[in-house]
Every structure is written in structure tokens, then in C-alpha cells.
Image (cartoon, rainbow, N blue to C red):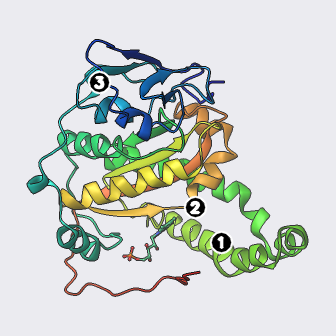
Amino acid sequence: MAIKTGRADKAALIILDRARCNNCGLCAEVCKGAPLYMEEGKLIIDESRWFGCIGCGHCMCICPQECITINGRDMSPDDMIPVPQKALQASYEQLYSLLLARRSIRVFQDRRVEAEIISKITEAVSTAPMGVPPSDVEILVFDTPAKVREFADDIIAMMKKSRWLFAPLVTKIMGLFAGKEYRESADTFINPALGIFLKEWEKGNDYLFYDAPLAMYFHLSLYADPADSLVAAAYAMLAAESLGLGTCMIGSPAYFIKYSKQIKQKYGLPLKNQPGIIVIFGYPRLKYRQALKRRLGKITYW
Ligand SMILES: Cc1cc2nc3c(=O)[nH]c(=O)nc-3n(C[C@H](O)[C@H](O)[C@H](O)COP(=O)(O)O)c2cc1C
């Protein structure tokens, strides 16, 4: 049975040119969906097997004979483009240098991010992997400081309205069900952070989006893996970094957007979509002189 997602409810169609196929088996080896398989040295297509074609595109990208194509689930043969030359692909040293040079940027130049740069970022995001194709990730773009501020204003209003949910007495009761980690995070971070955001906003200071000239809200349909929007956001950050921008992920607003029908309606967000994360972007005003070595919580080999 075909996997239902936000944008697909049927299997994609696999078309094979039998005259050109030499049954090399490469497509069957990469097909894990799994309508392609080999039987007695011959390629078999069975769309009723498992999920049918999920539209990952691997078979048409690997076929040396160029004799297999996929149509459907937002994929067509026109989507095949040459693999970039090895020399153009970032080496580990180049990629690691980009990762090391990145900092979460919260101080921006008074300069808008150009439309072509925004397109390059979204183009790079579209290459990201997703739980099940086609990607259900959606991006809401705020491309001027005024638009970002208006969005912040709406989120601040929602934060003001919901602040009581994080008051110590409420988190004490909620903690009985949600656990001590919830209570401790609410008491030591969420509640005081909300206090800071609201107080500073009244003084004209934006501690939510730091007066960024560009913000993107990554969200997605309820069918999708919640990780998809986070993967997409990470791709956006790294693409932006490579284009000379500074970025910062902004986690807290998504929870408030989730419960605000008003915000969803105003910005055309599907009411049922699951919340993701916001990334802010802009040209950095300050330059860091050192990079940082960091450690993860734990790495365990078993
Ligand atoms: C999921 C996530 C949510 C975040 N939310 C915020 C936020 O709301 N506000 C903020 O200033 N920074 C936020 N950050 C940025 C982190 O604070 C930042 O990554 C951390 O301080 C380490 O700094 P670095 O990114 O420069 O290494 C977030 C980062 C992640 C990954």
C-alpha cells in the first residue's frame, strides 16, 4: 500500500525501457521500497510489493543505461541533474572549517538579505533528506526587518497570554505528570526567559529575533517525521553560512504558534501542521576572533 503523506497518496509510476535494460541489478539493489527486485537474473517491477514506489528516485539516478524513470510523488525524469564534479564538492576540511567558523549570530548589520541569496538558501534546503518522500517541509519566509518584527509582535502577544502556564505553581502541578525535567526546565529557563522577552520587548528591545532582517519558519504536515523540519533548518543555516550570512535557530516561538489559531490564520499556516523551528538570518555586524571546541553530551560505542 502506498505511503500517505501530506502531498502524496499514491505510489509513483516506474517506467522501464526493457529494450535498453541489461538487468545489471543496480536499481534493485538501491530500491528499498521495494517494487524493484531481481529474480533469476531479471529485473522485476511489482508496484504492489511493500509500499510500491515511494519516489526516492534512486533507481533512475543509478541506472547506467538511463532506462528507468519515475513519475509521481512530486518526481519526474526532468528532476535528474548531473552529480557535481568531485572538485566542486566540499572536502571534509572545507566543511569542517565552515562548521567551526559558524556561531549563532544575534547582532546583525542594518542590511537586507537579497532575494537571490534567499533563493539559494531554499534551493539548498530542498536537497535535504526527509523521512518519506516527497518532503512535507514548508517554509514561511519573512524577508524584511519590518515583517520579522510584526511576526515577533504576534508571538510576544501569544507569550503574554500564555505566560501563566509556566508560573511556578502551574509547573509544579504539571511536573507531577510531565516529570521533574519539565518542571526544572520551565522554572529555570522557560518562565524566566519569557519574563525577559516580554520586559525587553516593552522597552523596544527584540530578544526574540534580535532585529534580524530575515526569518524562516520551518513547519510541516502531521504526516511527516518531526525531525524533517529540523534537518531542513540545519541545511538552511549551513547554506546561509557559506553565503556569508550569520544565523541563529530560535526554538521557543514554535510552541506558541502551535496553540495560536490567530497566528496560523494570519500567516496562512495550515491549522493542523506540526510546529518546527525558526531560523533568523542576516549579515553579521561583529567578527569572532576565535572558534570553539565543543563536546557532545556523550558518545558511546557499544
Ligand atoms: C533547537 C535550538 C533552539 C535554539 N533556540 C534559541 C533561541 O530561542 N534563542 C537564541 O538566542 N538562541 C537559540 N539557539 C541557539 C543556541 O543558543 C546556540 O546554538 C548555543 O548557544 C551555542 O552557540 P553556537 O551556536 O554559537 O555554537 C537555539 C539552538 C538550537 C539548536
Whether residue 73 appears in this view of the structure is no
189 sits to left or right of 59: right
For label 2, being within 8 Å of ligand 1 is answered yes
**Mark toward the start of the polypeptide (2 vs 1):** 1
- Locate residue 133, reporting x and y percent: 49, 35
- Choose between 128 and 65: the one closer to the eye: 65
Q: Quadrant of the C terminus?
A: bottom right
Give above or below for 30 relative to 182: above
Sort mark 2 into few (<14), some (14-19) or many (20+) by Cα contacts within 10 Å.
some
> Which residue does the image show at 74% across and 80% down from the upper left?
184
Helix, strand, or loop for circle 2? Answer: loop
- Locate residue 189, reporting x and y percent: 64, 77
Q: Amino acid at mark 2?
A: Ser
Give above or below for 148 relative to 64: below
Give above or below for 277 relative to 10: below
Closer to the observer: label 3 or label 1? 3
Residue at the spot of label 2: 252
Cα gap from disc 2 to disc 3, whole angstroms: 54 Å
